[in-house]
Structure formats: C-alpha cells, structure tokens
Image: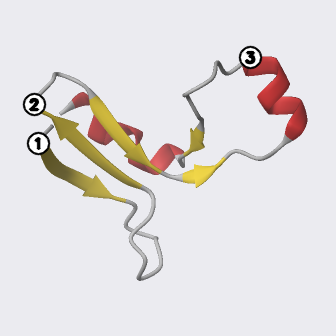
Amino acid sequence: MRLTFVGKDPDSNPTGSPTVYRTDRNTWIIQGWTVTDPEAISEMKIPEGETAVEIPDRIVHYLTQ
C-alpha cells in the first residue's frame, strides 16, 4: 500500500495528529484519537480487526480532495 499525505489538523500539536492520507487502493487512512468511550464503542458494534478513530470537523474537508 502506498500512502499520499493529504493534510493534517492545522491546530495539532507537534505530533501531527489527526492526519489524512490517500492510498493507491482508492481508500483513505485516518490517523486520529483512539475512541475509548465504552458507550460509543458499543453503539458502533466494531467487528474484530477494526477500530475507530475520532477526528475534528476542521479536517473533514481533506476527504473531498
């Protein structure tokens, strides 16, 4: 898989998160904050092998590029 950097949260600290990447598989990779809220996780019913990350509204525009 090849990643192309798309953009990162302009208000992020020096660690550079959250960040958006585009892949050569016509998919997106989102680096964000791990969702750990038990109620939210139970509502999503996340299957084995998957996870959820949280990103701020201010970087959603990168997903339309």
Which residue in the rendered view is the most extreme toward the bottom?
14
- Type of the residue with mark 2: Asp
Residue 17 as seen in the image, left or right of residue 26: right
Q: Pointer 1 and pointer 2: residues touching (CB < 8 Å)?
A: yes
Q: Which residue is mark 2?
A: 24
Give the distance between the C-alpha atoms of the residues marked 1 and 2, in whole angstroms: 6 Å
In primary-sequence order, the first of circles 3 and 1 is: 1
Give the distance between the C-alpha atoms of the residues marked 2 and 3, in whole angstroms: 28 Å
Residue beneath the point at 89% across and 31% down: 39
Q: Secondary structure at mark 2?
A: loop
Q: Pointer 3 and pointer 1: residues touching (CB < 8 Å)?
A: no
Residue beneath the point at 60% across and 36% down: 52
18 lies above or below 20: below
- Label 3 crowding class (10 Å Cα cut-off): few <14, some 14-19, many 20+? few
- Where residue 34 appears, as percent x and y from the top left, is 63, 50
Residue beneath the point at 51% across and 43% down: 57
Q: Which residue is mark 1?
A: 2
In primary-sequence order, the first of circles 2 and 3 is: 2
- Where residue 2 appears, as percent x and y from the top left, is 11, 42
In primary-sequence order, the first of circles 1 and 2 is: 1
